[in-house]
Amino acid sequence: MANTPQSKKRARQNEARFEVNKARRSRIRTYLRKVEEAIASGNAEAAKTALLEAQPELARGVSKGVLHKNTASRKMSRLTSRVKALNA
C-alpha cells in the first residue's frame, strides 16, 4: 500500500489512467469487432467502410500508448488483406 504522499498521488494517477486506457481499449475493440462482423457477413462495402473507421482508432491507440505500434500495424495489415480478399 502507498505510504508517502507521492506514492499515494501516483496510485491515484494510475487508477485514473487505467480507466481512461480501459475505455480506449474497449473503443478500439468495438471498431475491430465491426470490421470482423462485416467480413463475416460477406458485405464487402460495409467491411471497407468499417475498416476505414477502425484505422484511425488503432493509430490513436498507438499515439496514446494503449497499443504497441507493431501490434496496431499487424492488425491493420491483416484486416486490410481480409477485406481485399472479400472484394476478389
Image: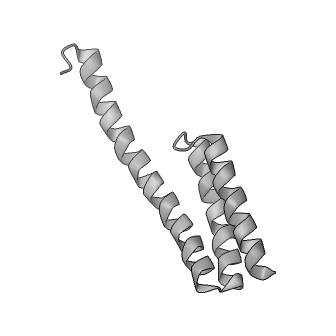
- Provide residue 59's location: percent of width, then percent of height: 65, 51
- At x 24% / y 22%, what residue is drawn? 8
Please tell me which residue lies in front, 40 or 68: 40
Q: Quadrant of residue 79?
A: bottom right
In this rendering, does residue 59 appear at all?
Answer: no
Whether residue 40 is visible: yes
Number of numbered discs: 0
The part of the image, by quadrant, that contains residue 1 is top left
- The residue positioned 64% from the left and 85% from the top of the image is 42
Q: Position of residue 61 (x, y in %)?
A: 56, 48
Question: Outermost residue toward the top?
Answer: 4
Residue drawn 55% across the image and 44% down it? 67
User: What colour scheme governs how the chains and residues are painted in the rendered image of this protein?
Assistant: one colour
- The answer to whether 20 appears left or right of 38 in the picture is left
Quick check: 24 above or below 4? below
Instruction: Give coordinates of residue 29: x percent, y percent.
Output: 49, 61
Q: Is 53 above or below relative to 43? A: above
Left/right placement of residue 6 relative to residue 75 reads: left
Q: Give the image location of residue 51, x and y in percent.
A: 66, 69
Residue at x-position 59% and y-position 58%: 57
User: Which image quadrant is residue 2 in?
Assistant: top left
> In the displayed structure, does residue 75 sit left or right of residue 37?
right
Viewed as shown, does residue 81 lie left or right of 22? right
Q: Quadrant of the C terminus?
A: bottom right
- Residue that sits furthest to the right in the current view: 88
